[in-house]
């Protein structure tokens, strides 16, 4: 009796695995929700930071959950000159989310909110938790390619600085792209 009980359990396990495999084959979540983006922009540093405004670059890896919501991990870097002489290096790491209006249109506005950390080096070691928010415009060129332009406001929790950026971004979506 024990052998047939084990055989039934094994058969049920095989059937369950086959059914779950076919269920995943029908899964609407595919690689097309994944995106990679590259950004280039201009950063306006808080006057109290004694840094000269300059260009910056960044990359992001994220997910488009649907046409209204996305989330990503964003990294950016800049090398501003200090107004006191020398230069600094800043690296930013953020988790951010975007909400898009007019989601069925190829040209749609969005709001972005994020939280992360800014690290500084060279001139002096520096670290601060940073909140940012902003508005932008997303333009879908093709299902796999899009352009974005946005303005962001950054606020440091530690020393209270306020930086601002204007950024342009090219977005690539994997697999079939946007549906």
Image: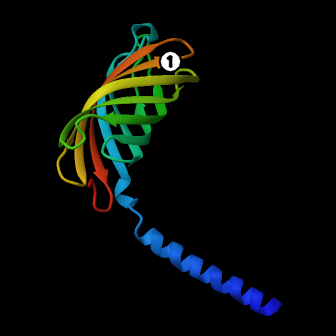
**In the current view of this chain or complex, which residue is farthest to the front?**
1
Identify the residue shown where x is 57% and y is 15%. 158
Identify the residue shown where x is 40% and y is 69%. 26
Which residue is tagged 1? 156
Is 174 rendered above or below residue 107? Answer: below
Q: Is residue 105 left or right of residue 21?
A: left
Q: Report x, y in % for residue 71.
A: 42, 41
Q: Report x, y in % for residue 130.
A: 50, 23
Q: Is residue 37 left or right of residue 106?
A: right
Which one is in front, 16 or 134?
16
Q: Report x, y in % for residue 8.
A: 70, 87
Which one is in front, 113 or 24?
24
Identify the residue shown where x is 23% and y is 46%. 146
Is 113 rendered above or below residue 12? Answer: above
SS class, disc 1: strand
Q: Report x, y in % for residue 42.
A: 30, 25
Identify the residue shown where x is 39% and y is 48%. 65
Is 120 rendered above or below residue 169? Answer: above
Pick the quarter of the image with the C terminus.
Answer: bottom left
**In the current view of this chain or complex, which residue is farthest to the right?**
2
Is 57 rendered above or below residue 21? Answer: above
Pick the quarter of the image with the N terminus.
Answer: bottom right
Q: Residues within 10 Å of mark 1 (few under 14, many from 20)?
A: some
């Amino acid at each position: 009796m024990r052998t047939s009980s084990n055989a039934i359990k094994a058969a049920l396990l095989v059937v369950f695995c086959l059914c779950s495999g076919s269920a995943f084959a029908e899964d609407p979540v595919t690689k097309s929700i994944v995106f990679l983006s590259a950004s280039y922009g201009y950063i306006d540093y808080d006057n109290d930071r004694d840094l000269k405004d300059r260009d910056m670059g960044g990359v992001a890896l994220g997910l488009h959950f649907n046409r209204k919501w996305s989330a990503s991990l964003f990294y950016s870097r800049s090398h501003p000159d200090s107004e006191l002489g020398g230069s600094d290096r800043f690296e930013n790491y953020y988790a951010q989310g975007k909400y898009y209006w007019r989601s069925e249109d190829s040209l749609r506005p969005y709001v972005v909110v994020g939280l992360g950390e800014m690290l500084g080096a060279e001139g002096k070691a520096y670290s601060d938790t940073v909140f940012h928010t902003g508005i932008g415009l997303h333009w879908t060129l093709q299902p796999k390619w899009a352009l974005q332009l946005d303005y962001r406001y950054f606020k440091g929790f530690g020393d209270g600085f306020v930086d601002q950026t204007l950024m342009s971004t090219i977005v690539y979506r994997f697999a079939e792209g946007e549906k």
